[in-house]
Amino acid sequence: MTTPPLSPGAYAEAVRAALADLPAADREEMLEDLDDHLMEVAAEPGLTLEDRLGSPEAYAAELRAAYGGRPARPRRRLTERTRNRAAGLLGTAHARLMQLPPYRQAAAFAPELRPAWWVLRGYAAALLILSGIGPRRLVPGDVAAWVFTLALVWASVWAGRRAVPGVPGWERALLLGANVVAAIVVLATMIDPPVQSSGSVAFDGGAPVPYGVQVENVAVLDGGSVYNIIPYDENGAPLHNVRLYDQDGRPITTDPESYGRAIAVPCEGEPPMRNSYPLPLMPEGAWVDPPPGDASACVTPSPVASPTVTPSSTGSPSDGATPSSPEGATPSPSPSATPSASPTKANGK
Amino acid sequence: MHSTVRRVDSSQLLKGVLDVAVLAVLAKRDSYGYDVVRSLREAGLEDVGDASVYGTLRRLFKAGALNSYVVASDEGPHRKYYGLNDVGRSLLTSSATTWASFAATMNHLLKEVAS
């Protein structure tokens, strides 16, 4: 025997743990004399409790058999017996592990974490219910959802504080089920956190058309071949410079480079925003990387939309010259730009 | 369940008659749990387990066959005494009759074997 002899308190604790599966009322009834008995035995000199009485688990098993194994109690159903046996095994393992200091410390502070679990449990339940009526989220979406979530957290904490001593069997089972579901939700959310893959897209454009469009993922619409968006207003008139954002204010961008297109840079001003639609695209092969201010770079033929993005550069847009070129001079010797989108215009490097 | 026939030892026999044994001890005088254990051992039931006796006492008490009271003690812990009430006494009487009949049958059955 390498472990030190158990004190009466520790022995009683282990016996109680081994009987933890029983209803609280039965357990109290059965264990009422336990402390007195252990004091009597401990008062006898010479032998330790375990030498005299066997292991706490054996004591618990014997007590259980003598107390409950008679027709005085209705015969237990098979499921109940199986459950009790499993719980008994768990209790025995717990009592054994309690001999190890690290486990003892963990078991000692685990109860202090219970309030945290109550909060997490309520939060998870709220998210589960909210995800039934809306998109999956990690945080409630609006004030009503927050109110609902806080109400469930409060209810969960209330139930946790209340459920410590003996509660009726069905209520206990209900609480156990809720705990299991909440644990599954928390684990599943940790493994697979919801990504904001869908949402409503608001148009922020030149025309007052603030309606929403359900967009799965712009880059994969229509089988994955969308690299530009051509918006029209309700009268069929094309819109320009429509800036698209998702529900979190992030720009919705496409990836035209993956489809052999490039965004044409206008002569003047800023380069076009990546989420300003329709994008002024040109075939990538025709792209020239000219010196800054080069006249040829101004050409922005759009192969996809008739309203080409010509940000009305100062001067006459049709002459191809660069009257306001900041660095001036060096007109490109390259062929003057043609406004038509000509894929064969391959004077690239 | 068991493929082999187990030899019946006294502890298994004891399980069936522990109720009667405990009732018989308490019929002589009121007693506390550990004292009942000692009385049974002194009477020759060496194999009786402490927890079995305590469990039996608790069950009989819950079934309404015993009354109980606490006695303060100067040198030791307070002790909870158990004693028979009317239910317990009638239970002991009927159990004793059953046991006597059963024992007679068994003795008769085993008479030739023993000799």
Image: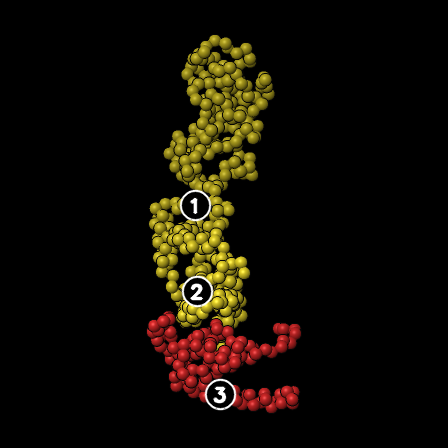
Chain colours: A yellow, B red
**Type of amino acid under label 2:** Pro
Q: Which of marks 3 and 2 is in front?
A: 2
Mark-to-mark CA distance, 3 and 1: 70 Å
Q: Out of A264 and A133, give the one closest to the viewer.
A: A133
x and y percent of residue A234 in the render?
A: 42, 36
User: Which mark identifies residue B96?
Assistant: 3
- Crowd rating for badge 2 (residues with CA inside 10 Å; few <14, some 14–19, many 20+): many
Q: Name the residue under label 1.
A: A138
- Crowd rating for badge 1 (residues with CA inside 10 Å; few <14, some 14–19, many 20+): some
Residue A212 seen anywhere in this rendered image of the structure: yes
Mark-to-mark CA distance, 1 and 2: 49 Å
Q: Out of B60 and A130, give the one closest to the viewer.
A: B60
Quadrant location of the C terminus of chain A in the rendered image: top right
Numbered disc 2: secondary structure: helix
**Type of amino acid under label 3:** Ala
**Residue drawn at (56%, 30%) of the image:** A258
Image mark 2: chain? A
Residue A329 placement, left or right of A151: right
x and y percent of residue B53 in the render?
A: 47, 76
Q: Nearer the viewer, mark 3 or mark 1?
A: 3
On whether disc 1 and disc 2 are found on a single subunit, the reply is yes
Q: In which quarter of the image is residue A315?
A: top left
**Residue drawn at (39%, 46%) of the image:** A140
Residue A28 placement, left or right of A56: left
Numbered disc 3: secondary structure: helix
Q: Mark 2 points at which residue?
A: A8
**Residue drawn at (47%, 9%) of the image:** A329
Q: Which of marks 1 and 2 is in front?
A: 2
Numbered disc 1: secondary structure: loop
Image mark 1: chain? A
Residue A26 seen anywhere in this rendered image of the structure: no
**Residue drawn at (50%, 66%) of the image:** A50
